[in-house]
Image (cartoon, rainbow, N blue to C red):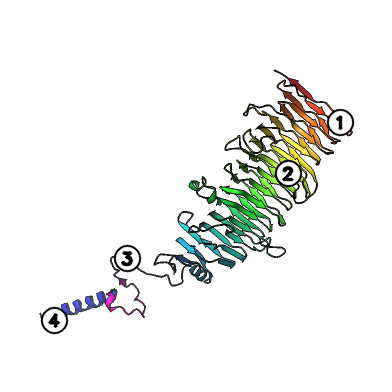
């Protein structure tokens, strides 16, 4: 019996030792030592509080929560963001962060949030996000907005990209950003020759104020995007609205190969210009919509080798007040080799707007230089308040395969000009194989224009007394192969 009692005591002792090895009370734990393999820790009410991953994560977090690696307090949060960037890891922004001074970023970084509405950088006063010299940088899923506290936002910039390395093998990407509230939301490029923005993609971003702010012009941005100096910046699936002056400005600095694809721009009947090109070569605008601008939905005042295709530009708000669809005017430099193909223009220059007596498309020389080599191919133009195309003092203007119709039908007025007009000294132009519906004149060749070829057009009207082709030029003019077809009905 004594032996049996002894054996039972030894078994109880062994069990208690095993239990002590695997269950450790927090009051007995020596935090300077590692836990034994398989040990358990009883947590406070089942929650792990103030825990860190000890550097094992590929990212660091910045935010106002205690579990963040860098905890912010809503004042000068740019300090904690920069500390996070110094780790060399991906930087994850959580919740709202407030910067009181410029947040200046350089090098190769990856900064992201949880999406607009969940992660925001709120700029106080004149503070900006400045990318001073970046390469292969990613900046995504963040809202950038300004909180001025009643002070003026004149001259402020939301995001200023001073330089992004123009190397063909490495590029930077901004994606899923919502930027609003500054005088200019995004600036690309600082100066030539070094501080330019190279291969750079802006994808799925929105620029403009909250919809509730649109009714107050003071809350609108002045210029949404300003591309000053760049080499092949690309805008894809972006939306721009709520601006007072320009949605997307290119120039006046030298900028080449700007690509604008699958984007939508809306001036809300207040913004002056949707896309304003002042300089540069080889710009491509494809599958975009630009509408409801008070002056012009697309304005080209300088630049060469520009392609616009498969796009719409015209009125979409108050159709009686919208400006011109497209203006090409050499205010800055010579303009040559511009092709507009498979595009649609409509609902412009209505009877109640500033451009009630202007054509929907205007090509005219300015103080900067000459215009030559403008081509329209397979375009459609309809429902405009005055005329379709006016060409003044320009050379080699070609309009081919277009459908031009329904002048003044919406506005119940009578045209005082032709559908297509060559004015001043135009030379070596052509109007071929178009369908033209006229409410007064069809095609006019005026002043000292010469060498305009008009052939193969189908011209029809509403018997208002105008001519299908009206020629009043004082210089020799030429209609080569002048087979045109027209009919007039009441």
**What residue sits right under mark 1 in the picture?**
480
Residue 291 x, y percent position in the rendering: 61, 41
Q: CA distance from mark 3 to mark 1?
A: 87 Å
Q: Secondary structure at mark 3?
A: loop
Please name whichever residue, 83 or 326, is drawn nearer the observer in this view of the structure.
326
Report the span colored magenta: 25-40
Answer with mark 2 or mark 3, whichever residue precedes in sequence: 3
**What residue sits right under mark 3 in the picture?**
47
Query: Mark 4 against mark 3, which lies toward the viewer?
Result: 3
Answer with mark 4 or mark 1, whichever residue precedes in sequence: 4
Quarter location, residue 185: bottom right
On residue 3, the disc is 4
Quarter location, residue 298: top right
The 10 Å Cα crowd at callout 1, few under 14, some 14 to 19, many 20 or more, is: few
Residue 169 x, y percent position in the rendering: 67, 61
On residue 328, the disc is 2
The image shows residue 409, relative to residue 79, as above or below, that is above
Q: CA distance from mark 4 to mark 1?
A: 128 Å
Residue 177 x, y percent position in the rendering: 54, 54
The image shows residue 362, relative to residue 82, as above or below, that is above
Q: Is residue 172 left or right of residue 458?
A: left
Q: Is residue 24 left or right of residue 67?
A: left
Q: Is residue 237 visible to us here?
A: no
Q: Residue furthest left?
A: 1
């Amino acid at each position: 019996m004594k032996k049996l009692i002894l054996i039972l005591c030894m078994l109880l002792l062994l069990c208690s030792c095993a239990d002590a090895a695997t269950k450790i009370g927090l009051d007995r734990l020596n935090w300077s030592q590692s836990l034994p393999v398989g040990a358990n820790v009883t947590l406070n009410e089942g929650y792990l509080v103030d825990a860190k991953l000890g550097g094992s994560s590929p990212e660091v977090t910045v935010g106002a929560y205690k579990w963040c690696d860098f905890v912010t307090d809503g004042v000068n949060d740019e300090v904690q963001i920069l500390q996070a960037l110094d780790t060399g890891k991906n930087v994850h922004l959580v919740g709202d962060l407030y910067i009181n001074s410029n947040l200046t970023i350089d090098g190769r970084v990856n900064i992201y949030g949880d999406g607009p509405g969940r992660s925001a950088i709120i700029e106080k006063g004149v503070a900006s996000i400045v990318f001073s010299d970046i390469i292969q940088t990613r900046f995504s899923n963040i809202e950038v907005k300004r909180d001025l506290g009643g002070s003026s936002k004149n001259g402020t910039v939301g995001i200023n990209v001073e330089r992004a390395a123009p190397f063909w093998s490495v590029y930077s990407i901004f994606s899923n950003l919502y930027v609003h509230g500054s005088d200019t939301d995004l600036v690309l490029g600082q100066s030539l020759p070094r501080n330019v923005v190279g291969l750079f993609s802006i994808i799925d971003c929105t620029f403009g104020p909250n919809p509730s702010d649109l009714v107050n012009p003071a809350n609108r941005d002045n210029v949404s995007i300003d591309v000053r100096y760049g080499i092949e910046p690309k805008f894809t699936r972006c939306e721009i609205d709520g601006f007072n002056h320009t949605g997307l400005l290119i120039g006046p600095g030298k900028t080449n190969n700007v690509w604008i694809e699958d984007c939508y721009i809306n001036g809300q009947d207040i913004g002056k210009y949707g896309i304003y090109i002042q300089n540069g070569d080889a710009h491509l605008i494809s599958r975009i919509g630009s509408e409801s601008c008070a002056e012009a939905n697309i304005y080209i005042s300088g630049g060469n080798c520009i392609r616009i295709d498969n796009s719409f530009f015209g009125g979409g708000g108050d159709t009686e007040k919208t400006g011109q669809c497209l203006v090409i005017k050499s205010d800055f430099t010579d303009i040559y080799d511009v092709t507009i193909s498979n595009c649609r223009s409509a609902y412009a220059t209505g009877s109640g707007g500033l451009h009630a007596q202007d054509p929907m498309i205007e090509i005219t020389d300015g103080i900067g230089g000459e215009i030559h080599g403008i081509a329209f191919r397979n375009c459609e133009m309809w429902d405009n308040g005055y005329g379709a195309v006016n060409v003044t003092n320009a050379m080699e203007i070609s309009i081919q395969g277009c459908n031009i119709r329904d002048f003044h039908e919406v506005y119940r007025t009578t045209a005082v000009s032709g559908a297509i007009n060559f004015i001043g000294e135009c030379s070596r132009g052509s109007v071929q194989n178009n369908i033209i519906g006229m409410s007064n004149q069809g095609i006019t060749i005026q002043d000292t224009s010469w060498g305009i070829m008009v052939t193969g057009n189908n011209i029809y009207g509403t018997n208002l007394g105008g001519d299908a082709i009206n020629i009043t030029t004082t210089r020799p003019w030429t209609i080569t192969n002048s087979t045109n077809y027209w009919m007039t009905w009441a």
